[in-house]
Amino acid sequence: MGARVNRARSLENIHHLPRIKRCCLPLGKSVPKSFKENIKNTCPRIGITVGDPAGIGIEVTLKAVADQSLRENCLPMIIGDARFLRAAADKMGLRADYRIVDEDTENLSKILFESKEPLIFDCRNINSAIEPGIESAVTGRASADYIEKAVALCLSGLIDAIATAPISKNALKMAGVPFPGHTEFLAHLTKTDEFAMSFFSGNLRVVLLSTHVSLKNALELVKHAAIVKLIRLTHREMQKLGVANPKIAVAALNPHGGENQMFGLEEAEEINPAIAECRAEGINVTGAFSADTIFLRNMRGEFDVVIAHYHDQATIPVKSLAFGEAVNVTLGLPLIRTSVDHGTAFDIAGQNLAEFSSMKAAIVLAAELSRRKPMSQSGAAV
């Protein structure tokens, strides 16, 4: 089958936690661009990682994939342990009787591009009992495997985009995975140096300067150079997504934008000079605007995207205005990755109580973005 990434860890070795590798080698031969273009405008194949097996990821994935309106937008492929996934589905009364494939499946490329039905890509990496709601090194390692496999499939052009169900940061840590979340892990796997977390929901689009760090550390990251870099990245990525001259608004950090330096100096010393530098380069960016109104202004269409300075400055308005509808999008990667706007919900895992609208929205947006972005020679979106 040519060069490929390492096969998913064997069942016997699930407890051995090897050093994380970047997914540099394609899984099988890359797909010719001409062949990929012939199907790109029809129905993109979206790889869906099921997240932490002890959380609600399997449930929301299966519910989303069973939705007929979603399957009119894309061709889903669930990435997980097929045996565990089907057992979980049986307990909750959900459908999981889809065709199973793996990296050794004969004519895998042909199946992926010709099948009109959902598929399950079997990583065969769970050999221990997993109790719903209980995170562990086993579930952390399994969820990391699914991400690695999805990246390899996407970089080789076998799928068009990735949508991810929630993972447990603590379980990743227990498994020895040295990344605090999807965003940083995906950047490592794709050798991406400039990247950013963002949230999309209709007109509401927010890009974050920092993510999973303490508030104290986040404030120390509000620096001129970092803001300039993020404005430039946001401008480039929005253009790739079809916005020719994106209107970027930058949030203030302090109350009332610092009120002429009475409530803080960051706007005058770091944020506004960064905005001025980018405007001099021809980027359509304005600010800094008071954070208490900027997100509503964005949602009403005044701006195309807002830059926020720390995690909760972004996620409080996103989850207040669009919970269950917002989608996490990683900007800067050589592939399209979307995710849900919620966590693993261990308290209701395995009980068939989870609402799947955010998972569905993430998959649908991944399909939409894959139609907008240009392709590399391998067939992957860039």
Image (cartoon, rainbow, N blue to C red):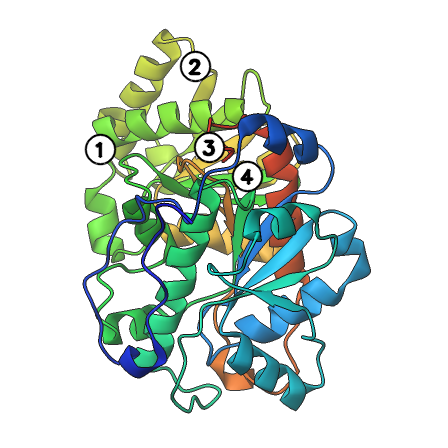
Residue at 48% of width from left, 81% of height from top? Answer: 346
Mark 4 and mark 3 residues within 8 Å of each other at the beta carbon: no
Residue at 55% of width from left, 46% of height from top? Answer: 159
Of circles 2 and 1, which is in front?
A: 2
Query: Which residue has dot 3 on it?
Result: 378
Amino acid tagged 2: Ile
Q: Earlier in the sequence, mark 2 or mark 4?
A: 4
Query: Which residue has dot 1 on it?
Result: 223
Amino acid tagged 1: Lys
Give SS at disc 1.
loop
Give SS at disc 4.
strand
Q: Quadrant of residue 43?
A: top right
Mark 2 and mark 1 residues within 8 Å of each other at the beta carbon: no
Q: Earlier in the sequence, mark 3 or mark 2?
A: 2
Amino acid tagged 4: Arg
How far is mark 4 from mark 3, CA to CA? 29 Å
Residue 140 visible in the shown view: yes
How far is mark 1 from mark 3, CA to CA? 37 Å
Query: Which residue has dot 2 on it?
Result: 283
Q: Quadrant of residue 366?
A: top right
Mark 1 and mark 3 residues within 8 Å of each other at the beta carbon: no
Query: Which residue has dot 4 on it?
Result: 205
